[in-house]
Image (cartoon, coloured by chain):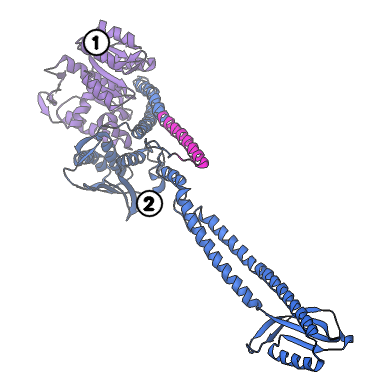
Chain colours: A purple, B blue
């Protein structure tokens, strides 16, 4: 999988690349508008991470260029601006997602995972992992070919883990994923624990192996080789 | 700062009016004895002159007609009877003195009950070679009568002056000071955060024109500073996002380290939490300055009841873990026009506060209707400080890691839509009511 990180902040780009490296992603970098434009027109990527404020030009123009060339690369906008206008404009120009800085790497990974899957398996988007079978379009889960009913949030958590396999995810990241901006207004993140507990219980009861591990009581990890 | 004129304050123009009136009173009161003194002196000297004239006339006439002493004595007697003011007595030459003037009080034939004032001349003269003592007394107006007459006229003039002062004052106030009051009204309605520019009327009075120019300069400068300040907050928040994103990503990476101990992992989690709070404050500051900078201009008609219900549904799982009961009365299908993001933030912030600052096993009452949005919750047992409640970073409790900006944002959104937000504490309930 090839990812292009268009970001003028080298430290952030490096962190993203480091985090994604373990998941068979090959990351390339572009730190300026012109470099980015050159790369997106020359190569094909599974996913492009696009910062809107770039030295030399507006990231939106890159989106427009991609659209003009009818390129099929997935695009996730990562912006410090968090302006609704940008979001709407970006999505309208063909971006797949919009993530405001600062974000958790796990959140980014989950989104990249979802974008790539959507691009690759447009019609039959099914994740198969041993006894688990997740249908992303129908939003259903089969374990040993038996349906398991999950709530919307539990399903969301499961997908989040799928996008962050073998990596430790902090409770904070999960809380933010579950409740968006509202998460940081809440004092305790016990509700994360409650959802995880329910998900684990349902998986175990359906005869699923215990892939979901608690790490030091502060984070979670989905272990699967 | 004081807006209304309180008891001790007077209008600018009334102050000189009072002083002028008092001054006029003093001057006019002082003029009464002065007038009396002058009038009295003129009067007395006139009468003295008259008395002297009478004396000369008597002396001349009696010497000219040359009658004998017997007839003269008879005539003098008769005369004294008819004209008691004039008395002529024969005296020995040895008793003769110099002429003297005097003032005496005595009753007259006509007004026997009252004492009258007389001015007299005592003089000696010779008729047919014999010495006579002559006294001529002429009636003068009494002191009290003179004074009361002068006082009466003076008071009349004083009243006339006061009426004139008041009348002139009103006319001056209406005309001369009009530019001043125009300027005053302009300043009263001035709002630094509003974008409406202030324009002072032209005036042809130098001082007022100077005042207006100075005010204009002051306001322009303030406005520019305010604008800079607002932009600064927004820019600063923006600039902070990227370094925050870097820290966040580094912590996420650190968490992946295989050699991490439980203790280190806890340190990372604590740093994560603090970082989340920093990001939150930063985001909210940005939001606040965006609202102040009128950046949420898009409005749409939307079902606000639905927003409230959604928010309550989301909060339910958080309130349930702490056993907080939510009593809600939400009027359905209340449509309002506004910015969706802002309305969501308003509703979420108020409801979220009710959960966050509640106690375990507490209660939340939510009442939403066309008229307003009321959120009441149990919590700490004493009232919050209403004065600082809606200010930035004035969170009343230190143990809750809020951003300190939630209510400031609520207030800002309310003022944007001209809604009223109020706080009250009653019966253990903290109530925030928004009236649309």
Q: Secondary structure at mark 2?
A: loop
Mark 2 residue crowding within 10 angstroms, few (<14) / some (14–19) / many (20+): some
Location of mark 2 (residue):
B383
Image position, residue B223 (x, y; %): 43, 34
Residue B244 among those drawn in magenta: no
Subunit bearing disc 1 = A
Can residue A11 be seen at all in this image of the molecule? yes
B286 horizontally vs B111: left or right: left
Image position, residue B141 (x, y; %): 65, 78
Residue found farthest to the top: A42
Image position, residue B322 (x, y; %): 28, 43
Q: Which residues are magenta?
A: B202-231
Q: Secondary structure at mark 1?
A: loop
**What number is the disc on residue A45?**
1
Taking depth in this image into account, of B138 and B180 the one nearest to the observer is B138
Image position, residue B409 (x, y; %): 34, 38
């Amino acid at each position: 999988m090839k990812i292009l990180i268009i970001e003028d902040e080298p430290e952030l780009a490096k962190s993203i690349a480091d985090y994604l490296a373990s998941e068979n992603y090959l990351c390339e970098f572009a730190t300026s508008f012109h470099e980015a434009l050159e790369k997106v027109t020359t190569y094909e990527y599974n996913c492009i991470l696009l910062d809107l404020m770039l030295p030399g030009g507006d990231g939106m123009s890159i989106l427009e260029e991609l659209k003009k060339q009818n390129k099929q690369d997935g695009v996730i906008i990562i912006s410090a601006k968090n302006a609704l206008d940008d979001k709407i404009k970006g999505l309208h120009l063909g971006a797949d997602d919009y993530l405001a800085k600062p974000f958790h790497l796990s959140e980014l990974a989950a989104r990249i995972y979802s974008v790539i899957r959507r691009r690759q398996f447009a019609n039959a988007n099914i994740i198969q992992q041993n006894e688990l079978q997740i249908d992303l379009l129908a939003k259903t889960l089969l374990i040993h070919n038996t349906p398991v009913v999950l709530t919307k949030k539990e399903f969301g958590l499961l997908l989040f883990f799928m996008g962050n396999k073998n990596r430790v995810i902090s409770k904070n990241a999960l809380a933010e994923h579950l409740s968006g901006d509202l998460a940081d207004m809440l004092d305790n993140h016990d509700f994360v624990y409650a959802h995880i507990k329910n998900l684990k219980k349902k998986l175990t009861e359906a005869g699923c192996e215990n892939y979901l591990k608690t790490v030091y009581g502060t984070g979670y990890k989905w272990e699967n080789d | 700062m004081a807006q209304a004129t309180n008891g001790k304050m007077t209008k600018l123009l009334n102050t000189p009016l009072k002083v002028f009136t008092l001054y006029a009173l003093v001057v006019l009161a002082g003029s009464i004895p002065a007038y009396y003194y002058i009038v009295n002196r003129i009067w007395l000297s006139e009468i003295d002159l008259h008395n002297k004239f009478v004396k000369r006339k008597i002396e001349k006439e009696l010497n000219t007609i040359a009658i004998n002493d017997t007839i003269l004595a008879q005539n003098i007697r008769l005369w004294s009877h008819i004209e008691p003011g004039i008395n002529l007595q024969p005296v020995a030459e040895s008793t003769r003195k110099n002429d003297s003037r005097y003032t005496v009080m005595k009753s007259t034939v006509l007004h026997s009950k009252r004492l009258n004032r007389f001015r007299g001349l005592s003089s000696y003269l010779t008729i047919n070679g014999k010495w006579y003592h002559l006294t001529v007394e002429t009636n003068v107006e009494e002191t009290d009568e003179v004074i009361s007459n002068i006082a009466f006229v003076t008071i009349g003039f004083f009243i006339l002056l006061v009426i004139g002062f008041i009348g002139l004052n009103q006319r001056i106030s209406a005309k001369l000071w009009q530019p001043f009051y125009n300027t005053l009204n302009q300043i009263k309605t001035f709002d630094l955060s509003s974008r409406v520019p202030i324009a002072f009327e032209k005036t042809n009075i130098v001082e007022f024109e100077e005042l207006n120019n100075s005010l204009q300069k002051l306001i322009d400068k303030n406005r520019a500073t305010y604008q800079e300040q607002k932009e600064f907050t927004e820019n600063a928040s923006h600039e902070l996002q990227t370094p925050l994103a870097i820290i966040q990503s580094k912590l996420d990476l650190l968490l992946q380290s295989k050699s991490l101990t439980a203790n280190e992992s806890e340190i990372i989690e604590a740093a994560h939490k603090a970082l989340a709070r920093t990001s939150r404050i930063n985001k909210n500051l940005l939001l606040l300055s965006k609202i102040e900078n009128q950046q949420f201009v898009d409005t749409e008609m939307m079902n606000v009841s639905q927003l409230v219900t959604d928010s309550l549904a989301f909060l339910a799982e958080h309130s349930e873990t702490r056993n907080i009961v939510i009593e809600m009365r939400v009027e359905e299908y209340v449509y309002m026009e506004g910015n969706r993001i802002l309305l969501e933030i308003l509703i979420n912030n108020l409801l979220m506060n009710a959960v966050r600052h509640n106690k375990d096993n507490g209660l939340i009452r939510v009442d939403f209707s066309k008229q307003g949005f009321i959120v009441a919750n149990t919590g700490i047992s004493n009232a919050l400080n209403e004065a600082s409640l809606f200010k930035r970073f004035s969170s009343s409790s230190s143990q809750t890691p809020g951003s300190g900006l939630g209510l400031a944002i609520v207030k800002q959104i309310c003022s944007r839509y001209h809604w009223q937000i109020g706080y009250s504490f009653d019966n253990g309930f903290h109530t925030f009511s928004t009236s649309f």
